[in-house]
Amino acid sequence: MLQIGPLTIDFTPLLEKALTGNPFTLGWYILQKGGWIPLLYVTLRGFWWIWKKHIDVKEQNKWKWVLLSIDIPAENIQSPRAVENIMAHLAGAHDKADLIEKFFTGFAQPFFSLEIVSIGGAIRFYVYTIDKFRTLVESSVYAQYPTAEITEAEDYTKGTPNYFPDSVYNLWGTEWKLVKNQGYPIRTYEEFHDSTAEEAAFKDPMAALLESMSALLPSEQIWFQVLITCVASRSWQEGSYRLVEKLAGIPSQHKPSWLEKILALPSHILVRVIDAFLPGDPEHTAKIKDELPSKMLYLTPGEREVIEAIEEKAAKIGFHTKIRGIYISRHDAHNKAKVAWGMVGAMKQVNTEDLNALKPDTKKIGTHA
């Protein structure tokens, strides 16, 4: 017997069934006594997931894609903030599913692929997007670079094999992932200004990547792609705020779910019992008094900078992001040390030891023999 307030649960029949040694009898008894409820829930959730996946993929297959080539004249000089403004403009593509799309016709959040491609040393900038967002992409670029030229381009991947290993071509590729929690930022363009120079100079972090791309042989190619998917405003910052609370020792403002409340119920009951029987316990009272609202006063300058960097990132417009790079060449010209590791080295410029870093996810995503 288990007594929980006015509720009494009798486990005797269940133990008797278990002791009979017949698992089918025990299973049938559990199903009769309510075991079918979680089984029905899991089954319905499975069917819903299959149906949702089916209608969402069906909707995605209707998309018509276009590859836009972007050429910006060298004399059109802008600061990197212009690109940040372009990103903010593209965030306007975010949409939410209505009831019909959610349950019947399907819905998928469109994404953009921002690409830098070098074929034999000739570098091109592309945006791969859905046809209905072509005007959005063009207007966001023209707003920052009025003299830019945007034209529709042919798919540059058609000249390479679809399957590897290949008798003529060799391939290396990977995706980059964050080393720490996504609340920690990587080094941003604002930190590439050299304040010690006589005139404030900007050290372009893309220079190393573009230098590697420009030095390719005619039979070599690099595809560098950044895929961004729009997300709802303030949808990902909650984790950043909890991270700040943890680092600063601030009592969490997180509202527990009903499941968390149920799991925490025994500890709350225990605290109530202790307070009821030991209302004047000096040790218990001292512990409460010693608890500080936060430890902000005791943080080192470096710890304060980390918290400020997390809060600064949380103030930005966010995207779900995937970064990947591919190096393709003929077998006789394949030079991983020069090209592949050059691409990895160029990405290390945004890494910091105290905040966050990007590293190749070679174990999970990278190419393997």
Image (cartoon, rainbow, N blue to C red):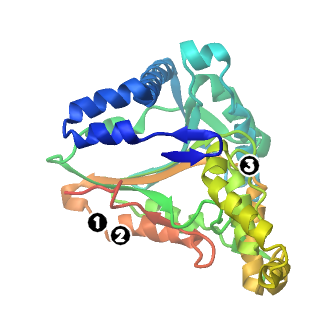
Q: Nearer the viewer, residue 322 or 244?
A: 244
Check residue 215 in the rendering and tell me which mark sits there, or answer none: none
Q: Which residue is label 3 attached to? A: 317
Q: Amino acid at mark 1?
A: Asn
**Could you tell me how far apart the alpha carbons at marks 3 and 1 are, in whole angstroms?**
38 Å
Secondary structure, mark 3, is loop
Q: Which residue is mark 2?
A: 338
Residue bearing the label numbered 1 = 335
Instruction: Looking at the image, tell me whether mark 3 or mark 1 is earlier in sequence order.
Output: 3
**Residue 264 in view, yes or no:** no
Give the amino acid at mark 3: Ile
Q: Residue at x 70, y 50 (%)?
A: 256
| Residue 294 percent coordinates (x, y) | 82, 75
Tell me the CA gap for discs 1 and 2.
Answer: 6 Å
Q: Which of the marked residues, 2 or 3, is nearer the chain's N terminus?
A: 3
Q: Position of residue 35 (x, y in %)?
A: 41, 30
Mark 1 vs 2: CB contact within 8 A: yes
Q: Residues within 10 Å of mark 1 (few under 14, many from 20)?
A: some
In terms of image quadrants, where is residue 300?
A: bottom right
Judge from the rendering whether residue 115 lies leftward or rightward of residue 244; answer left or right: left
What whole-number distance in Å separates the C-alpha atoms at marks 2 and 3?
35 Å
Q: Amino acid at mark 2?
A: Lys
Q: Left or right of 328: which side holds 344?
A: right
